Amino acid sequence: MSAPPDAERLHALDAVRAGALLLGIVLHGALSFVPLVPDVLWPVHDVSQHWAMGVLVYVIHVFRMSVFFLIAGLLSRALFHRLGPRAFWRNRARRIALPLVLAWPLCFGLLAAVALWNLAETHGGTLPPIPEETLDAGLNFLHLWFLYILLWLYAIAWGVRAVMRALDRRGRVMQALDRLLRALLATPLRSLALALPIALALGCSRCGTGAAACRRPATPGYHRWRRCSCTPSCSASAG
């Protein structure tokens, strides 16, 4: 017996989301071939480097995670309405939170071991002093940060939805916003509408000395965003 249409997976969107994540392997694998990358960002540097690899990294970095979070939001909304709130949170705990908790110790331990081994090998077998920037970062989720951010986004979206349903019991405001968004996405301005949230976040780069920290996800170990002296919207965009 086939599953009902609303329970079928959207395989095309799944493929795009998976492709965005797989591009992360290409991006991180190419970093060692990019000239002038600081050690704190990527401590491994290949002897053969070329500016074209920098272009590749930049192009991938511009859209990759934005596409991932956009599709993750679309699919999560469909899942929420299909399962209901309780079943949705159980699903997210099993599919997002549990892998984060279980995989983080292994991921952190392996990456730390490889990084320390590489530092020792490049300094004649002696481990040099750990850079202050690395020590200041402390424990963090490393490449699993997107799972942590997904949980935050789920909670924020669920909270906003609950507040709107309480304030707008007849759904008139939400219907008006839905019509406005549909109309906007039907115009040539749709690309600007989708790019606006990212543009606002990147606008934090004009905040001053704390700009680099503001652009980091507000995850454990990425605590330097607190030093940002810009407006509250900057801190909100960080996490």
Image (tube, grey):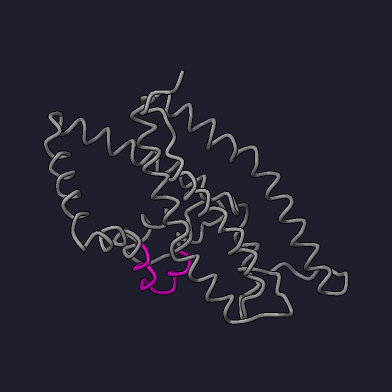
Is 211 one of the magenta-colored residues?
yes
Residue 49 on image: x %, y %: 67, 80
Q: Quick one: which residue is furthest to the top in this view?
A: 1
Residue 5 on image: x %, y %: 37, 28
User: Along the line of sight, which residue is nearer the eye, 229 or 103?
Assistant: 103
Q: Which residues are magenta?
A: 201-214
Give the residue drawn at x 67%, y 71%.
32
Locate residue 155: give its quadrant.
top left
Is 72 one of the magenta-colored residues?
no
Q: In the picture shown, does residue 91 fall above or below 34?
A: above
**Residue 53 visible (yes or no):** yes
**Residue 85 visible (yes or no):** no
Q: Is residue 171 shown left or right of residue 9?
A: left
Q: Is residue 238 shown left or right of residue 186?
A: right
Give the residue drawn at x 65%, y 72%.
39
Locate residue 57: give its quadrant.
bottom right
Give the residue drawn at x 55%, y 59%.
23
Q: In the picture shown, does residue 220 fall above or below 232?
A: above
Residue 79 on image: x %, y %: 39, 32
Q: Is residue 82 shown left or right of residue 102?
A: left
Residue 191 on image: x %, y %: 28, 62
